[in-house]
Image (cartoon, rainbow, N blue to C red):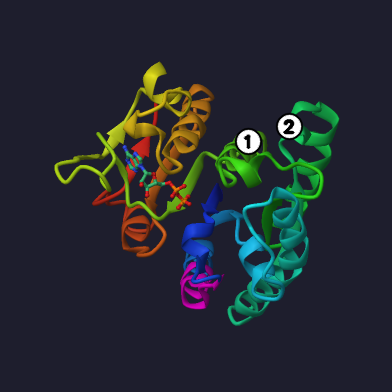
Amino acid sequence: MNKQRMVIKVGSHVLAEEGAIAKKRMMDLVEFIALLKEHKYEVILVSSGAVAAGFTRLPLDRTIVANKQALAAIGQPLLLKMYQEKFATFDLLCSQVLLSADVFEAKNQIAHAKVAIDTLLANNVIPIINENDTVSIEELIFGDNDRLSAYVAHYFDAKLLVILSDIDAFYDKDPNLHKDAKRRAVVTEISKDELEAGHTPNNTFATGGIVTKLQAADFLMKHGREMFLASGFDLAAVKSFLIDKEHLDGTLFRS
Ligand code: ADP
């Protein structure tokens, strides 16, 4: 049976809690990835959380970008060590791949990176990708790896990107502001207004990180790929979607 390649992106709101890494949630995620591998999925993980991990050792002011870069450099090895220990309990090996969005502008760099990723996956190793925050800071400021994970899915040839977020789906309006917001189960088109909402003040779509998620979805849909947005706090929806093939919650973006 051919393995299906997928990318899972986990945001820092899910991985961090009260200034530290949420260990239980990380363990649940690792256990879920181990389960996916049993079900013949090849999994690439895009993980935020380095800044939060660094902050546990050196509480610098995180409103300053240079401090965030320093915290990411401190936290990245700590984060990987935690992943390594957790994956080891399932006899799985993981690896660290640091990328920046510009890698995807250079064909030869994409090719080098893809060879490395393919080789890791062929050897049953889980690549854990993060932005290299020392050289590129865009995702530190805006997007929290949403864009990077869409590029990873497309250029490393994954059919599906799963975004595990602090929100359980995409709604017709911001559910934190509107009690009557309705979940969109399947989205096949994203309007220009929704994609550009970040630039429009007072637009409800501009809050939180939903705009960068919609941009990621739009990019993937235009390239014939899919994105599934679901809760990272409770993995039941993503589990039933991927393992039982039942779409009970979360939003599927596909063209
Ligand atoms: P994460 O860090 O988990 O990747 P973000 O917090 O950056 O996610 O982005 C998700 C947030 O976007 C939600 O918590 C919600 O407040 C906000 N949001 C704004 N509009 C919407 C919408 N239409 N549907 C879902 N979430 C929305």
Three-letter residue code for mark 2 = Phe
Indicate the secondary structure of the residue bearing disc 1.
helix
Figure check: 135 above or below 223: below
Q: How many marks?
A: 2
- Tell me residue 147's x, y (percent): 58, 37
Residue 40 visible = no
- Tell me residue 15's x, y (percent): 52, 65
Say which residue appears at 47% left-offset and 38% top-offset.
Answer: 213
* Left or right of 244, for residue 127: right
Judging by the rendered image, the residue that carries numbered circle 2 is 104
- The verdict on residue 82 being magenta is no
Mark 2 residue CB less than 8 A from any atom of ligand 1? no
Pointers 1 and 2 in contact (CB under 8 A)? yes
Judging by the rendered image, the residue that carries numbered circle 1 is 151
* Left or right of 190, for residue 110: right
* Left or right of 183, for residue 118: right
The C terminus lies in which quarter of the figure?
Answer: top left
Say which residue appears at 47% left-offset and 27% top-offset.
Answer: 218
**Span highlighted in magenta in the image:** 20-31
- Tell me residue 133's x, y (percent): 75, 49
Task: State the image quarter where residue 231 is shown.
Answer: bottom left
Say which residue appears at 41% left-offset and 44% top-offset.
Answer: 228
Three-letter residue code for mark 1 = Tyr
Foreground of the two, 120 or 20:
20
Foreground of the two, 58 or 26:
58
- Mark closest to the chain's N terminus, 1 or 2: 2
* Left or right of 86, for residue 235: left
Rendered image: mark on residue 193? none
